[in-house]
Every structure is written in C-alpha cells, then in structure tokens.
Image: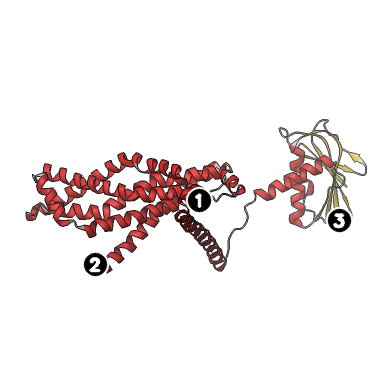
Amino acid sequence: MRIGLARGGVTSEVAGMSGPLETGEARATAAEAEGGLEVTLAGVWQITAPRPSWAQLRGERVLAWVRLRIDGVEKWDSSLLLFLFEVQEWCRVAGAHCDTAALPEKVRELLAQLARARETSVPKDRSESFLSGVGQATIGTWRRTRTASTFLGESVLGIVQLMKRPARFRWRDCFEEMQHCGAMALPIVSLISFLVGLIMAYQAAVQLRQFGADIYVADLVGLSVVREMGPMMAAIILAGRTGAAFAATLANMRANEEVDALEVLGISPVQFLVLPRLIALSVMMPLLVLYSNGMGILGGMVVSAGVLDIPPAAYWIETQSIIDLSDMSTGLIKALAFGVLIGLAGCWRGLQAERSAAGVGRAATSAVVTAILLIIVADSVFAVIFNFLGW
C-alpha cells in the first residue's frame, strides 16, 4: 500500500492505482517495506504554501528505518528542509535509522547545518554540584590572587630600580600625570570638601547649641576632617576620577596592542606605564588631602559664622587648639596609603582588561570599585592601628 500527501491532504495508491495530484503542489509519498518507510518528495516546496505533515504521513506505524529521497521536485526552499529535519528529529527520538544517502549533496549539507544550529540553540545544562562550584571559585580566587601578587611584586621591583637608577625614570610623564591628578582635581576636591565641612558643622550645631556648646563645633569639624573625612573624601574622588582614567587609558592601550609592542621591545609595561602614574598619585595625594582639610574647615567656619554667630577668629583659634601634629600625621599617612592603593588598582585593572571596547568600560568600573573597597579596608586597618598606638 502506498500513501501520499499533497497540501496536507491524503491520497492513496492501492495495487498500482493512484489518485490524481495537482501539479505544482508539495507532495510526499510513503511506501512501506520490511519494517521501514521509504519517503519520496516531489512537486514545489515553498514556505508560503502548505506542506505535507510527517505525523499524518507516518500514522501510527512503528518504524525501524526511514529512507528519504527526492524525485521530481521542481522548486524548493526552506520548507523542504524543515520537513526533512522534522523526519530526522523524529527518527532520532524514536530510535529509527534515517537514511539520507539518496538526497542531493547540497540538501544534505543544508540539513546538517540546520541540525548544528538546532544543537547550539538548545540551552545546555549548566547546573553543577556544590563541591564543583566551590572548587571553581577557589581556582578563580587563586588565579586572581596570583595575578595581583605578580603585579604588586613587579611594582615593588620597579620602585627599587627607580631608586637605583633615577635617571632612567620617565620624569616628564610623571610630571604630566601630577598635573592631571593634582592641579586639575582641585575644583572638584574644593567643592566636595567644602560641602562636607559645611554639612558636618550644620548637623553638629543643631545638637551642640542645645547645651550651649556652640564653640565645640570647631573641635568636631576640625578633628573629623583632618583625621577621617579629608583623606576619605579626597581618596574617593580620586578613585572615581583618576583611578578610572588610569584603567581606561591602559585598557585602551592593551586593546590597541601597544602593551604587547612594549613587551616585544623588551620594555616592562610596569616600569614604563605604571610607575609614572603611581609615583605621581602618591606624591599629589597628601597635598590634595591638606587642601581638602583646609576647605572642610572653611566650610565649618562659614556655618559657625552664619548660624552660631561665632567669629572666624575664635573658630580658628579653637581649631588650632584641638588639632595637633599627631592628627595631621594620621591624615597624611592615610593619604599616602590611599594614593598608592588607587594607583595600583587603576593600573592593575587596566593591564588585565579584555581586548575590546567593552573591556575598557569594564576595566574602568572595576578599578573604581576595587579602589573604594581597598580604601575602606585600609581605613579600618588604620583605625585599629592608631587606636592601639594611642594616636
């Protein structure tokens, strides 16, 4: 018995007698033989026209094999491939053998490409066990730690080489970086520090004036700014401004293969690119912190004069009486450490960036996050150490 499909309809051929089929339609004829099915395709196969259904052609039969061949196909497009792929997928699921040897070579190639595309589009099972996840996280952490340690070691060796041979250092690049991260950062540092001092003085005035202790606003603002807020605010500003700029510049050089060119020439990227930026930021950071302290105290003085009617001279005398050398040195030590951490974070993230435009953006973002995290951790460590020393 021979069964044929045309435009989704079923026609049958029994004992050599076949029903009429319209010319130009997509036709699929199936003939049973020895537990299998031989499928012959003919007619015009177009995606805009109905095509035969494999489910109707197969029926309820259990098949061991399916042989596909083309005989009299006048015109075809992806409609033919979709039908063949449907048959192939059913054979794979049912465990039947699909014989495509009789198909033209071009059709077999396109069918194989469609099968590969189907395999890549199916989401893979990415679930993993708890131990596997812990192991992968441990390996990733170890690799990042090793990379950071290598970079830190190269930076230390570069500083040692600088002290031995200062004439070989790129002082011109260092002075240019001092200009960018120092003098050009004064406007934003001035604004932020002044506003922070103003806010702290106003909040303190609201509480202290209830007890008639208005003059102690100078003590609170002076100590807070010099020991904590001045270094912290300047460091956060430079982390977002200078640290991100370092990372973006080095990441762009890495994407353009300029860093690779330096390595090919035998020039260390750390000594050529990192050390001028690191030295410049380490030198300018304490100076910016001193300036930030002055602007913060000035903000507190403005509030005291405008809200508490405290003369600027009295405010300044009270500030001088409460701040000593240990307070100043505490802020400057933090400033130096923060400058080194910001420079290291920015340069490290820049040199480890991916070689693409997206990698440059991710490197800048990662540099800011890393720098701020290191600043907070270092400030906590300094708080414990200074409390232990009694400073």
- Mark 1 secondary-structure assignment: helix
Mark 3 neighbour density, 10 Å: few (under 14) some (14–19) many (20 or more): few
- Mark 2 secondary-structure assignment: loop
CA–CA distance between discs 2 and 1? 39 Å
| Circle 3: residue type | Gly
Mark 1 neighbour density, 10 Å: few (under 14) some (14–19) many (20 or more): many
Q: Residues at badges 2 and 1 in contact (C-beta under 8 Å)?
A: no
| Circle 2: residue type | Gly
Lateral position of residue 64 relative to residue 385, left or right: right
- The label shown at residue 35 is 3
Percent coordinates x, y for residue 105 in the rendering? 84, 42
Q: Earlier in the sequence, mark 3 or mark 1?
A: 3
Residue at the far top in the pictured view = 23
Lateral position of residue 129 relative to residue 17, left or right: left
Relative height, residue 208 to residue 295 (above, below): below
- The label shown at residue 390 is 2
Percent coordinates x, y for residue 13 in the rendering? 88, 42
- Mark 3 secondary-structure assignment: loop
The residue closer to the viewer here, 275 or 149, is 275
CA–CA distance between discs 2 and 3? 93 Å
Q: Earlier in the sequence, mark 2 or mark 3?
A: 3
Q: Nearer the viewer, mark 2 or mark 1?
A: 1
Percent coordinates x, y for residue 244 in the rendering? 43, 45
Residue bearing mark 1 = 271
The residue closer to the viewer here, 307 or 352, is 352
Quadrant of the image containing the C terminus? bottom left
| Circle 1: residue type | Gln
Percent coordinates x, y for residue 372 in the rendering? 38, 53
